[in-house]
Image (cartoon, rainbow, N blue to C red):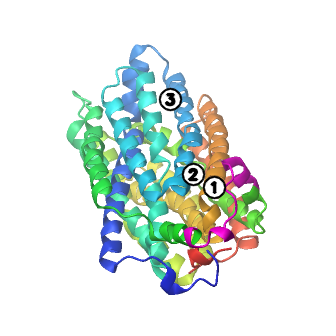
Amino acid sequence: MENNQKEEDRISYTKKYIYYSAAILGFINLIDIFMSNIGPLVVSFVVDEFLISRGVPENMAYAQYGLAMALVPLVGLISVMIKYLADKYGRKFALVINVAGMTLGALLIIFAQDFWVYVIGTLLGGLFLAADIQLLFINEEAPKEKRSQFVNAIRIVGLVGALLVPIFRGIFITSSNPNWRALFLLPLIAGIAVTLIVIVTFKESSVYLTMKAQKQANPDQQKEKISFFKAVKASLKLQNFRIIFLTFLTGFLGVMAGFTFRSYWEPFLSQNFEFNEVNMIYITRYLISIPLGAAVGLINDKVGRKAGLLTTLIMLPVFLILCLIAVQSKSMILTGIFYGLFIYSLWLTPATTGTMVNELTPTQYRGTITVFLGIVYVALLVVTSVIFAILVLWLSFEMVFFIAVIPGCLVAILLTIKALPETKATDLTKVE
Protein backbone atom coordinates (compact mmCIF):
# COMPACT_ATOMS: atom_id res chain seq x y z
CA MET A 1 0.00 0.00 0.00
CA GLU A 2 1.26 3.43 -0.83
CA ASN A 3 2.37 5.82 1.88
CA ASN A 4 -0.14 8.47 0.76
CA GLN A 5 -3.21 6.30 1.27
CA LYS A 6 -5.72 8.00 3.54
CA GLU A 7 -6.47 6.46 6.93
CA GLU A 8 -10.22 6.52 6.24
CA ASP A 9 -9.73 4.39 3.12
CA ARG A 10 -8.49 1.48 5.19
CA ILE A 11 -10.82 -1.36 6.10
CA SER A 12 -11.03 -1.82 9.85
CA TYR A 13 -12.98 -3.90 12.36
CA THR A 14 -14.43 -3.06 15.75
CA LYS A 15 -12.30 -3.49 18.84
CA LYS A 16 -14.77 -6.16 19.99
CA TYR A 17 -14.22 -8.24 16.84
CA ILE A 18 -10.45 -7.83 17.00
CA TYR A 19 -10.43 -9.20 20.54
CA TYR A 20 -12.80 -12.01 19.52
CA SER A 21 -10.57 -12.95 16.59
CA ALA A 22 -7.52 -12.81 18.86
CA ALA A 23 -9.27 -15.21 21.27
CA ILE A 24 -10.06 -17.69 18.47
CA LEU A 25 -6.54 -17.38 17.04
CA GLY A 26 -5.19 -17.97 20.53
CA PHE A 27 -7.28 -21.15 20.82
CA ILE A 28 -6.02 -22.29 17.43
CA ASN A 29 -2.48 -21.70 18.66
CA LEU A 30 -3.34 -23.69 21.79
CA ILE A 31 -4.30 -26.67 19.60
CA ASP A 32 -1.21 -26.13 17.45
CA ILE A 33 1.16 -26.00 20.43
CA PHE A 34 -0.57 -28.89 22.21
CA MET A 35 -0.18 -31.17 19.21
CA SER A 36 3.36 -29.93 18.55
CA ASN A 37 4.39 -30.80 22.11
CA ILE A 38 2.88 -34.27 22.34
CA GLY A 39 5.54 -35.92 20.20
CA PRO A 40 8.54 -34.60 22.18
CA LEU A 41 6.98 -35.79 25.47
CA VAL A 42 6.33 -39.37 24.32
CA VAL A 43 9.58 -40.04 22.43
CA SER A 44 10.80 -42.78 24.78
CA PHE A 45 7.43 -44.60 24.60
CA VAL A 46 7.21 -44.36 20.81
CA VAL A 47 10.83 -45.48 20.32
CA ASP A 48 10.38 -48.34 22.78
CA GLU A 49 7.09 -49.57 21.23
CA PHE A 50 8.06 -49.31 17.57
CA LEU A 51 11.85 -49.88 17.62
CA ILE A 52 13.59 -51.05 20.82
CA SER A 53 10.93 -53.68 21.66
CA ARG A 54 11.37 -55.01 18.12
CA GLY A 55 15.11 -55.57 18.44
CA VAL A 56 16.69 -52.25 17.40
CA PRO A 57 19.68 -51.26 19.65
CA GLU A 58 18.95 -48.18 21.76
CA ASN A 59 21.50 -45.80 20.20
CA MET A 60 20.46 -46.90 16.70
CA ALA A 61 16.77 -46.51 17.64
CA TYR A 62 17.22 -42.92 18.78
CA ALA A 63 19.38 -42.10 15.77
CA GLN A 64 16.66 -43.57 13.51
CA TYR A 65 14.02 -41.54 15.34
CA GLY A 66 16.08 -38.37 14.95
CA LEU A 67 16.60 -38.97 11.24
CA ALA A 68 12.86 -39.60 10.77
CA MET A 69 12.04 -36.38 12.62
CA ALA A 70 14.46 -34.54 10.31
CA LEU A 71 11.79 -35.14 7.66
CA VAL A 72 9.34 -32.96 9.62
CA PRO A 73 10.92 -29.66 8.57
CA LEU A 74 11.29 -31.11 5.07
CA VAL A 75 7.51 -31.17 4.65
CA GLY A 76 7.73 -27.50 5.50
CA LEU A 77 8.76 -27.03 1.88
CA ILE A 78 5.14 -27.81 1.11
CA SER A 79 3.81 -26.14 4.23
CA VAL A 80 5.16 -22.72 3.31
CA MET A 81 3.05 -22.86 0.15
CA ILE A 82 0.01 -22.49 2.42
CA LYS A 83 1.32 -18.99 3.17
CA TYR A 84 1.55 -18.33 -0.55
CA LEU A 85 -2.12 -19.39 -0.78
CA ALA A 86 -2.79 -16.84 1.97
CA ASP A 87 -1.55 -14.14 -0.40
CA LYS A 88 -3.45 -15.52 -3.38
CA TYR A 89 -6.80 -16.58 -1.87
CA GLY A 90 -6.87 -14.85 1.51
CA ARG A 91 -5.83 -15.41 5.10
CA LYS A 92 -9.13 -17.05 6.13
CA PHE A 93 -8.92 -19.70 3.40
CA ALA A 94 -5.37 -20.58 4.44
CA LEU A 95 -6.35 -20.68 8.12
CA VAL A 96 -9.13 -23.20 7.47
CA ILE A 97 -6.75 -25.42 5.47
CA ASN A 98 -4.18 -25.13 8.28
CA VAL A 99 -6.51 -26.21 11.11
CA ALA A 100 -8.21 -28.98 9.12
CA GLY A 101 -4.80 -30.40 8.16
CA MET A 102 -3.62 -30.48 11.77
CA THR A 103 -6.78 -32.38 12.69
CA LEU A 104 -6.23 -34.98 9.98
CA GLY A 105 -2.66 -35.54 11.17
CA ALA A 106 -3.90 -36.25 14.72
CA LEU A 107 -6.40 -38.78 13.38
CA LEU A 108 -3.72 -40.75 11.51
CA ILE A 109 -1.36 -40.83 14.51
CA ILE A 110 -4.09 -42.23 16.76
CA PHE A 111 -4.45 -45.26 14.47
CA ALA A 112 -0.69 -45.79 13.86
CA GLN A 113 0.43 -49.39 14.44
CA ASP A 114 4.03 -49.21 13.27
CA PHE A 115 6.81 -46.63 13.30
CA TRP A 116 6.48 -45.40 9.72
CA VAL A 117 2.71 -44.92 9.95
CA TYR A 118 3.41 -42.85 13.06
CA VAL A 119 6.04 -40.89 11.11
CA ILE A 120 3.60 -40.29 8.23
CA GLY A 121 0.99 -38.98 10.66
CA THR A 122 3.60 -36.76 12.28
CA LEU A 123 4.70 -35.47 8.88
CA LEU A 124 1.12 -34.73 7.91
CA GLY A 125 0.57 -32.85 11.15
CA GLY A 126 3.88 -31.02 10.73
CA LEU A 127 2.90 -30.03 7.21
CA PHE A 128 0.18 -27.81 8.64
CA LEU A 129 1.61 -27.03 12.08
CA ALA A 130 4.54 -25.26 10.44
CA ALA A 131 2.29 -22.86 8.50
CA ASP A 132 1.26 -20.84 11.61
CA ILE A 133 -1.37 -18.86 9.66
CA GLN A 134 -2.86 -17.77 12.98
CA LEU A 135 0.30 -15.74 13.65
CA LEU A 136 0.24 -14.15 10.20
CA PHE A 137 -3.42 -13.29 10.84
CA ILE A 138 -2.83 -11.62 14.22
CA ASN A 139 0.22 -9.74 12.91
CA GLU A 140 -2.07 -8.00 10.40
CA GLU A 141 -5.14 -7.58 12.62
CA ALA A 142 -3.51 -6.30 15.82
CA PRO A 143 -3.08 -2.53 16.44
CA LYS A 144 0.41 -1.57 15.30
CA GLU A 145 1.36 -0.06 18.65
CA LYS A 146 0.50 -3.34 20.42
CA ARG A 147 1.40 -5.82 17.70
CA SER A 148 4.14 -7.67 19.57
CA GLN A 149 2.00 -7.84 22.71
CA PHE A 150 -0.89 -9.38 20.72
CA VAL A 151 1.45 -11.88 19.05
CA ASN A 152 3.02 -12.88 22.36
CA ALA A 153 -0.45 -13.09 23.95
CA ILE A 154 -1.40 -15.62 21.26
CA ARG A 155 1.79 -17.52 22.03
CA ILE A 156 1.09 -17.43 25.77
CA VAL A 157 -2.36 -18.95 25.18
CA GLY A 158 -0.52 -21.60 23.18
CA LEU A 159 1.57 -22.30 26.27
CA VAL A 160 -1.62 -23.34 28.06
CA GLY A 161 -1.89 -26.07 25.44
CA ALA A 162 1.72 -27.03 26.07
CA LEU A 163 1.04 -27.11 29.83
CA LEU A 164 -1.85 -29.52 29.28
CA VAL A 165 0.44 -32.07 27.60
CA PRO A 166 2.36 -33.21 30.72
CA ILE A 167 -0.94 -33.17 32.65
CA PHE A 168 -2.53 -35.49 30.07
CA ARG A 169 0.73 -37.47 30.02
CA GLY A 170 0.33 -38.12 33.74
CA ILE A 171 -3.34 -39.09 33.30
CA PHE A 172 -3.12 -41.44 30.32
CA ILE A 173 0.38 -42.90 30.57
CA THR A 174 1.31 -45.35 33.30
CA SER A 175 4.02 -47.99 33.58
CA SER A 176 1.44 -50.71 32.92
CA ASN A 177 -0.50 -48.86 30.21
CA PRO A 178 1.51 -46.29 28.20
CA ASN A 179 -1.53 -45.05 26.24
CA TRP A 180 0.27 -42.17 24.49
CA ARG A 181 -2.22 -42.19 21.58
CA ALA A 182 -4.95 -40.81 23.86
CA LEU A 183 -3.08 -37.49 24.03
CA PHE A 184 -3.99 -36.83 20.38
CA LEU A 185 -7.75 -36.91 21.10
CA LEU A 186 -7.81 -33.24 22.16
CA PRO A 187 -6.37 -31.83 18.89
CA LEU A 188 -8.68 -34.16 16.96
CA ILE A 189 -11.90 -33.06 18.69
CA ALA A 190 -10.96 -29.40 19.18
CA GLY A 191 -9.62 -29.18 15.63
CA ILE A 192 -12.97 -30.23 14.15
CA ALA A 193 -14.82 -27.70 16.32
CA VAL A 194 -12.56 -24.72 15.62
CA THR A 195 -12.52 -25.41 11.86
CA LEU A 196 -16.31 -24.94 11.84
CA ILE A 197 -16.04 -21.81 14.03
CA VAL A 198 -13.57 -20.16 11.64
CA ILE A 199 -15.68 -21.00 8.59
CA VAL A 200 -18.86 -19.57 10.12
CA THR A 201 -17.70 -16.58 12.17
CA PHE A 202 -14.32 -15.35 10.90
CA LYS A 203 -13.75 -12.39 8.60
CA GLU A 204 -10.90 -11.88 6.19
CA SER A 205 -7.84 -9.97 7.42
CA SER A 206 -8.49 -6.21 7.26
CA VAL A 207 -4.99 -5.55 5.89
CA TYR A 208 -5.52 -8.14 3.14
CA LEU A 209 -8.95 -6.70 2.24
CA THR A 210 -7.57 -3.14 2.23
CA MET A 211 -4.82 -4.12 -0.19
CA LYS A 212 -7.34 -5.99 -2.36
CA ALA A 213 -9.73 -3.01 -2.38
CA GLN A 214 -6.93 -0.66 -3.37
CA LYS A 215 -5.98 -2.90 -6.27
CA GLN A 216 -9.60 -3.07 -7.46
CA ALA A 217 -10.02 0.71 -7.15
CA ASN A 218 -6.81 1.44 -9.06
CA PRO A 219 -6.47 -1.33 -11.67
CA ASP A 220 -4.37 0.88 -13.90
CA GLN A 221 -1.76 1.16 -11.15
CA GLN A 222 -1.48 -2.58 -10.63
CA LYS A 223 1.30 -4.59 -12.10
CA GLU A 224 0.54 -7.62 -14.23
CA LYS A 225 0.14 -10.78 -12.17
CA ILE A 226 3.29 -12.87 -12.14
CA SER A 227 4.10 -16.46 -11.24
CA PHE A 228 5.38 -17.43 -7.82
CA PHE A 229 8.94 -17.85 -9.09
CA LYS A 230 8.89 -14.45 -10.76
CA ALA A 231 7.50 -13.01 -7.53
CA VAL A 232 10.43 -14.53 -5.63
CA LYS A 233 12.87 -13.10 -8.16
CA ALA A 234 11.28 -9.66 -7.75
CA SER A 235 11.39 -10.01 -3.96
CA LEU A 236 15.10 -10.76 -4.03
CA LYS A 237 15.66 -7.42 -5.75
CA LEU A 238 14.11 -5.45 -2.91
CA GLN A 239 16.48 -2.76 -1.70
CA ASN A 240 16.51 -4.09 1.84
CA PHE A 241 16.48 -7.81 1.06
CA ARG A 242 19.99 -8.26 2.50
CA ILE A 243 18.77 -6.93 5.85
CA ILE A 244 15.63 -9.10 5.65
CA PHE A 245 17.77 -12.18 5.05
CA LEU A 246 20.22 -11.38 7.86
CA THR A 247 17.26 -10.92 10.21
CA PHE A 248 15.89 -14.32 9.16
CA LEU A 249 19.34 -15.94 9.55
CA THR A 250 19.66 -14.56 13.06
CA GLY A 251 16.37 -16.20 14.00
CA PHE A 252 17.43 -19.51 12.45
CA LEU A 253 20.74 -19.57 14.33
CA GLY A 254 18.80 -19.12 17.55
CA VAL A 255 16.34 -21.91 16.84
CA MET A 256 18.33 -24.51 14.88
CA ALA A 257 18.73 -26.66 17.99
CA GLY A 258 14.96 -26.85 18.43
CA PHE A 259 14.34 -30.17 16.69
CA THR A 260 17.31 -31.72 18.48
CA PHE A 261 15.72 -30.92 21.82
CA ARG A 262 12.32 -32.12 20.60
CA SER A 263 13.84 -35.49 19.68
CA TYR A 264 16.11 -36.14 22.65
CA TRP A 265 15.19 -34.03 25.70
CA GLU A 266 12.45 -36.32 27.06
CA PRO A 267 14.65 -39.46 26.79
CA PHE A 268 17.50 -37.47 28.41
CA LEU A 269 15.27 -36.46 31.33
CA SER A 270 13.91 -40.02 31.61
CA GLN A 271 17.47 -41.26 32.07
CA ASN A 272 17.98 -38.90 35.01
CA PHE A 273 14.55 -38.56 36.71
CA GLU A 274 11.51 -40.65 37.64
CA PHE A 275 8.34 -40.55 35.47
CA ASN A 276 6.39 -38.15 37.72
CA GLU A 277 9.47 -35.95 38.14
CA VAL A 278 9.69 -35.60 34.35
CA ASN A 279 6.04 -34.48 34.28
CA MET A 280 6.74 -31.89 37.00
CA ILE A 281 9.80 -30.61 35.09
CA TYR A 282 7.65 -30.02 32.02
CA ILE A 283 4.86 -28.38 34.03
CA THR A 284 7.41 -26.05 35.65
CA ARG A 285 8.94 -25.38 32.24
CA TYR A 286 5.62 -24.27 30.76
CA LEU A 287 4.61 -22.18 33.79
CA ILE A 288 7.90 -20.25 33.80
CA SER A 289 7.55 -19.65 30.05
CA ILE A 290 4.33 -17.63 30.47
CA PRO A 291 5.85 -14.62 32.30
CA LEU A 292 8.92 -14.84 30.05
CA GLY A 293 6.72 -14.53 26.95
CA ALA A 294 4.88 -11.56 28.43
CA ALA A 295 8.15 -9.87 29.44
CA VAL A 296 9.76 -10.28 26.02
CA GLY A 297 6.59 -8.95 24.35
CA LEU A 298 6.77 -5.81 26.48
CA ILE A 299 10.48 -5.38 25.77
CA ASN A 300 9.83 -5.72 22.03
CA ASP A 301 7.11 -3.06 22.04
CA LYS A 302 8.39 -0.66 24.70
CA VAL A 303 12.18 -0.84 24.22
CA GLY A 304 12.58 -2.32 20.75
CA ARG A 305 12.80 -5.53 18.74
CA LYS A 306 16.60 -5.65 18.96
CA ALA A 307 16.52 -5.44 22.75
CA GLY A 308 14.04 -8.32 22.91
CA LEU A 309 16.09 -10.36 20.46
CA LEU A 310 19.34 -9.84 22.36
CA THR A 311 17.56 -10.78 25.59
CA THR A 312 16.56 -14.22 24.31
CA LEU A 313 19.83 -14.85 22.48
CA ILE A 314 21.86 -14.18 25.62
CA MET A 315 19.51 -16.28 27.74
CA LEU A 316 19.94 -19.34 25.49
CA PRO A 317 23.54 -20.35 26.32
CA VAL A 318 23.31 -19.11 29.93
CA PHE A 319 20.25 -21.16 30.85
CA LEU A 320 21.27 -24.21 28.82
CA ILE A 321 24.44 -24.50 30.89
CA LEU A 322 22.54 -23.88 34.15
CA CYS A 323 19.93 -26.47 33.13
CA LEU A 324 22.51 -29.17 32.41
CA ILE A 325 24.14 -28.46 35.79
CA ALA A 326 20.73 -28.78 37.47
CA VAL A 327 20.13 -32.15 35.76
CA GLN A 328 23.45 -33.47 37.00
CA SER A 329 22.53 -32.24 40.50
CA LYS A 330 19.18 -34.09 40.25
CA SER A 331 17.32 -30.86 41.09
CA MET A 332 13.84 -31.29 39.60
CA ILE A 333 12.58 -27.74 40.25
CA LEU A 334 15.73 -25.97 39.05
CA THR A 335 15.81 -28.18 35.96
CA GLY A 336 12.23 -27.17 35.14
CA ILE A 337 12.89 -23.46 35.72
CA PHE A 338 16.14 -23.30 33.77
CA TYR A 339 14.82 -25.48 30.96
CA GLY A 340 11.70 -23.32 30.68
CA LEU A 341 13.77 -20.12 30.46
CA PHE A 342 16.08 -21.75 27.93
CA ILE A 343 13.61 -23.46 25.62
CA TYR A 344 11.09 -20.62 25.44
CA SER A 345 13.91 -18.19 24.72
CA LEU A 346 14.77 -20.53 21.85
CA TRP A 347 11.25 -20.35 20.38
CA LEU A 348 10.81 -16.62 21.10
CA THR A 349 13.94 -15.80 19.10
CA PRO A 350 12.49 -16.63 15.63
CA ALA A 351 9.16 -15.14 16.76
CA THR A 352 10.87 -11.79 17.22
CA THR A 353 12.84 -12.01 13.99
CA GLY A 354 9.66 -13.13 12.19
CA THR A 355 7.92 -9.97 13.38
CA MET A 356 10.93 -7.93 12.22
CA VAL A 357 10.89 -9.59 8.80
CA ASN A 358 7.18 -8.77 8.45
CA GLU A 359 7.91 -5.16 9.40
CA LEU A 360 10.71 -4.94 6.85
CA THR A 361 8.77 -6.49 3.96
CA PRO A 362 6.17 -4.74 1.75
CA THR A 363 2.67 -6.23 2.09
CA GLN A 364 2.54 -7.29 -1.56
CA TYR A 365 5.72 -9.34 -1.07
CA ARG A 366 5.16 -10.48 2.52
CA GLY A 367 3.72 -13.90 1.70
CA THR A 368 6.23 -14.52 -1.08
CA ILE A 369 9.20 -13.58 1.09
CA THR A 370 7.82 -15.81 3.85
CA VAL A 371 7.64 -18.74 1.42
CA PHE A 372 11.16 -18.19 0.11
CA LEU A 373 12.68 -17.82 3.57
CA GLY A 374 10.64 -20.83 4.69
CA ILE A 375 12.28 -22.93 1.97
CA VAL A 376 15.74 -21.77 3.07
CA TYR A 377 14.81 -22.43 6.71
CA VAL A 378 13.68 -25.96 5.94
CA ALA A 379 16.81 -26.78 3.93
CA LEU A 380 19.08 -25.54 6.73
CA LEU A 381 17.03 -27.27 9.43
CA VAL A 382 17.03 -30.63 7.64
CA VAL A 383 20.82 -30.51 7.23
CA THR A 384 21.47 -29.55 10.86
CA SER A 385 18.92 -32.07 12.19
CA VAL A 386 20.56 -34.90 10.23
CA ILE A 387 24.00 -33.88 11.52
CA PHE A 388 22.81 -33.85 15.13
CA ALA A 389 20.99 -37.20 14.68
CA ILE A 390 24.20 -38.79 13.41
CA LEU A 391 26.19 -37.32 16.32
CA VAL A 392 23.85 -39.14 18.74
CA LEU A 393 25.42 -42.42 17.59
CA TRP A 394 28.73 -41.42 19.24
CA LEU A 395 28.16 -38.46 21.57
CA SER A 396 26.11 -38.04 24.73
CA PHE A 397 22.86 -36.10 24.64
CA GLU A 398 24.51 -33.30 26.67
CA MET A 399 27.34 -32.83 24.18
CA VAL A 400 24.93 -32.75 21.22
CA PHE A 401 22.82 -30.11 23.00
CA PHE A 402 25.90 -27.98 23.63
CA ILE A 403 27.10 -28.18 20.01
CA ALA A 404 23.59 -27.40 18.70
CA VAL A 405 23.18 -24.21 20.77
CA ILE A 406 26.35 -22.32 21.71
CA PRO A 407 28.10 -21.58 18.36
CA GLY A 408 24.93 -20.43 16.58
CA CYS A 409 23.92 -18.15 19.46
CA LEU A 410 27.28 -16.41 19.50
CA VAL A 411 27.05 -15.64 15.77
CA ALA A 412 23.41 -14.51 16.13
CA ILE A 413 24.31 -12.07 18.94
CA LEU A 414 27.00 -10.48 16.76
CA LEU A 415 24.58 -10.17 13.81
CA THR A 416 21.95 -8.53 16.02
CA ILE A 417 24.40 -5.95 17.35
CA LYS A 418 26.18 -5.18 14.08
CA ALA A 419 23.67 -5.66 11.25
CA LEU A 420 20.00 -5.60 12.23
CA PRO A 421 17.81 -2.45 12.19
CA GLU A 422 15.12 -1.44 14.68
CA THR A 423 11.56 -1.99 13.36
CA LYS A 424 9.39 -1.13 16.38
CA ALA A 425 5.88 0.31 15.67
CA THR A 426 6.14 -0.09 11.89
CA ASP A 427 2.83 0.44 10.03
CA LEU A 428 2.54 -2.71 7.91
CA THR A 429 0.38 -0.91 5.33
CA LYS A 430 3.14 1.65 4.70
CA VAL A 431 6.11 -0.62 4.10
CA GLU A 432 7.54 -0.06 0.61
Q: CA distance from mark 3 to mark 2?
A: 31 Å
* Labelled pair 2, 1 in contact (Cβ < 8 Å): yes
The type of residue carrying mark 3 is Tyr
User: Is tag 3's residue or tag 2's residue first in the polypeptide sequence?
Assistant: 3
The label nearer to you, 3 versus 2, is 2
For the view shown, which residue lies furthest in the top direction?
55
Whether residue 338 is visible here, answered yes or no, is no
Place of residue 312 in the rendered image (x, y in percent of width and height, measured from the top left): 56, 66
Mark 1 lies on residue: 368
Residue at mark 3 to residue at mark 1: CA–CA distance: 33 Å
In the image, residue 94 lies in the stretch drawn in magenta: no
Please name the residue that numbered disc 3 is placed on: 65
Q: Which mark is residue 84?
A: 2
SS label for mark 2: helix
Q: Which residue range is magenta in the image?
A: 216-233
Q: Quadrant of the C terminus?
A: bottom right
Between marks 3 and 1 in the image, the one whose residue lies nearer the viewer? 1
Measured from the top left, where is residue 104 in percent x and y?
Answer: 36, 36
Q: Is residue 21 left or right of residue 341?
A: left
What residue type is disc 1 on?
Answer: Thr
Q: Is residue 17 above or below residue 190?
A: below
Horizontal placement of 63 versus 36: left or right? right
Q: Which of the two discs, 2 and 1, labels the residue nearer the N terminus?
A: 2
Quarter-of-image position of residue 149: bottom left
Q: Give me the residue at 56% from left, 42% from top.
A: 76
Q: Position of residue 111 (x, y in %)?
A: 31, 26
- The answer to whether 425 is drawn above or below residue 251 in the figure is below
